[in-house]
Amino acid sequence: MPLAYVLVNTEIGTDNIVLKEIAKLNSVVEAHQVYGVYDIVVKVYTDSMKHLKEVVTWNIRKIANVKSTFTLIGMD
């Protein structure tokens, strides 16, 4: 079961809106607003690497006001 942390950059002032949308996604276990280079950190569990790619590419990255993502894949 792949685990990933997705670091998200949002348009200025939209991080709360984006966070609420990300939290609605089925594969998202946790999502937190953070300070620093990124605006949101998302913990994602999926059943396969293919599904992880779909969640990041077609769900998270397609949310309005998401500028970019950076995915860190966890190791067992």
Image: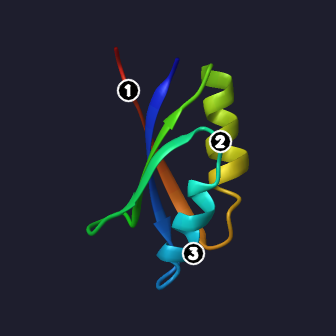
Q: Secondary structure at mark 1?
A: loop
> What crowding class fits label 1: few (fewer than 14 Cα within 10 Å), some (14-19), or many (20 or more)?
few
Q: Secondary structure at mark 3?
A: helix
User: x, y (%) of residue 27?
Assistant: 60, 38
Give amino acid for label 3: Ile
Q: At 66% from the left edge and 40% from the top edge, which residue is drawn?
A: 55
- Vertically, is 58 above or below 8? above
Check whether the beta carbons of the residues at disc 3 and disc 1 lie within 8 A of each other: no
The Cα atoms of the two marked residues, 2 and 1, are separated by 19 Å
Extreme residue toward the top, this view: 76
The Cα atoms of the two marked residues, 2 and 3, are separated by 17 Å
- Vertically, is 74 above or below 61? above
Q: At 38% from the left edge and 26% from the top edge, which residue is drawn?
A: 74
Q: Can you say which quadrant of the picture contains the C terminus? A: top left
Check whether the beta carbons of the residues at disc 2 and disc 1 lie within 8 A of each other: no
The residue that mark 2 highlights is 26
Give amino acid for label 2: Asn
Who is closer to the viewer here, 21 or 63?
Answer: 21
Which label sits on residue 17?
3
Who is closer to the viewer here, 65 or 19?
Answer: 19
First in sequence, mark 2 or 3: give its number.
Answer: 3
The Cα atoms of the two marked residues, 3 and 1, are separated by 27 Å
> What crowding class fits label 3: few (fewer than 14 Cα within 10 Å), some (14-19), or many (20 or more)?
few
User: x, y (%) of residue 2?
Assistant: 50, 22
The residue that mark 1 highlights is 74
- Vertically, is 1 above or below 62? above
Give amino acid for label 1: Gly
